Image: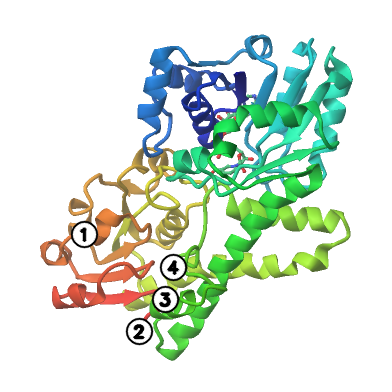
Amino acid sequence: MKLTVIGCGYLGATHAACMAELGHEVLGMDSDLDKVQVLNTGKAPFHERDLDEMLARHTASGRLKFTASYAEAAAFADLHFIGVGTPQQPGENAYDLSYLFAAVRQLAPRLKDPAVIAVKSTVPVGTAPRVRDLLHEFAPAGDRVEVAWNPEFLRESFAIEDTLRPDRLVLGFDTKHSWAEAVLRQCFDKVIEAGTPTIVTDWATAELAKASANAFLATKISFINAVAEVCEASGADVNTLADILGHDARIGRRGMRPGLGFGGGCLPKDIRGFMARAGELGADQALTILREVDAINNRRRERMVDLAREQLEGILMGKRITVWGAAFKPDTDDIRDSPALAVAQKLHELGAAVTVTDPQAVDKARKQHPELDYVDDPIAAVQDADLLLHLTEWPQFAHIDPHRLAARAANPRVIDGHGTLNADTWRQAGWKFRALGRP
Ligand code: NAD
């Protein structure tokens, strides 16, 4: 099939490459010309495991191209996926849907023939009819343009795997047995044939599928982090506790990660957008739980700053603090709402000299936080440090030998934000060791 993917960020570039991998002819479209140029060289403008290799393969074969032209996109295919950003509105909980509506408004006047618009961006429930109305008003093909809702559940750092072999495929349509359903089933035929649970539903349920999945995942993380607060007060170990809880199949260990809390371009804004939309619908009480989930999450960052102050005998001013991690989680360079950078920036504001290191995210972090110092090598970054903070759980940090590091630090003190450093080994190497949620 021929198809386009409009909006080629973390979601869209991955989707475009994976659709080419499934055998389709794909045109990725993005309004950011720099991004388009990089993608056309077969490289991703961000770090995602195996994506460069897949982009290189399919741009070389000619099956995958990128453009900044809506005219080209509209002429290329009759199936258009939309994956533009839906960030949080500044100063509000609600989503900013302006990128989505701008994309639809730019595409619509160019749709002369029947087409399917499959939206993957995460939105508040009730957005699909607004997209349909815009398309029917502005497309020459009028109501022969159909809207499908295809929420995306991929996790950055597993994005390719999650796109090619998703846990489930959700397809939302306005009417049963629509033409759009046949088109999308054909597009995803290899995924469906592989046995992926495929749920065909209405628009609202498809929109809510993503909102509620992220709300649940955020709740699971904040639940264990609330328990971590009690562990800290009582001398218990939250990591062991999470293991114990996780053996109960009804609870499960996956996704229950005690630590510095969630960040990134999805969970924080998605729980806020979900609350805002519930409020608009008069169902705000249903989601007050998410306000607490958000508050617990933010308290983890504050707790880390407090622990750092405590470890430095109450004085942050002038202290040299090394932060391991800038990305919001390992194996990505995404720094959107990164807990690690939030802590680093707060410590800087409080007068500490903060040096940040990260295997992938230093360039992006430097652009967003030029006030912090950056060092590429995590061992060199510890030179003369008064305190080391382990804030993004890249596996390579856990493999660094603390004996090698101890001599470099001015004062061998470390706080583990994720419970993945081996406390005994670090203590034996002479470090004063603290961790969130552990004795
Ligand atoms: P992103 O910021 O990385 O990418 C968005 C892209 O859209 C950018 O490249 C931007 O230039 C482009 N864009 C914006 N307006 C445009 C327009 N009018 N025309 C063409 N291109 C335009 O964001 P992302 O992380 O890829 O997220 C995109 C959507 O997918 C969001 O709704 C997000 O919530 C959802 N989502 C993301 C993930 C993830 O892991 N990143 C997972 C599931 C769902």
Element type where label 3 sits in the image: helix
Residue ID for mark 2 = 439
Q: In terms of sequence position, does the residue under pointer 4 or pointer 2 come before the other?
A: 4
User: Could you give the CA–CA distance between mark 1 and mark 4, rounded to whole angstroms?
Assistant: 18 Å
Q: In terms of sequence position, does the residue under pointer 1 or pointer 4 come before the other?
A: 4
Amino acid at circle 3: Asp
Figure check: 315 above or below 136: below
Q: To which quarter of the image does residue 200 belong?
A: top right
Element type where label 4 sits in the image: loop
Amino acid at circle 1: His
Left or right: 235 as drawn, with respect to 187: left
Residue ID for mark 3 = 243
Between circles 3 and 1, the one closer to the viewer is: 3
Amino acid at circle 2: Pro
Residue at (25, 71) in percent of width and height: 422
Left or right: 129 as drawn, with respect to 358: right
Q: Nearer the viewer, residue 122 or 334?
A: 122
How far across and how far down the image is residue 284, in percent?
82, 63
Q: In terms of sequence position, does the residue under pointer 3 or pointer 4 come before the other?
A: 3
User: Could you give the CA–CA distance between mark 3 and mark 4, rounded to whole angstroms?
Assistant: 14 Å
How far across and how far down the image is residue 151, in percent?
66, 42
Figure check: 310 above or below 71: below
Residue at (35, 84) in percent of width and height: 439
Q: Which mark is residue 259?
A: 4
User: Could you give the CA–CA distance between mark 2 and mark 3, rounded to whole angstroms?
Assistant: 16 Å
Left or right: 7 as drawn, with respect to 242: right
Figure check: 373 above or below 149: below
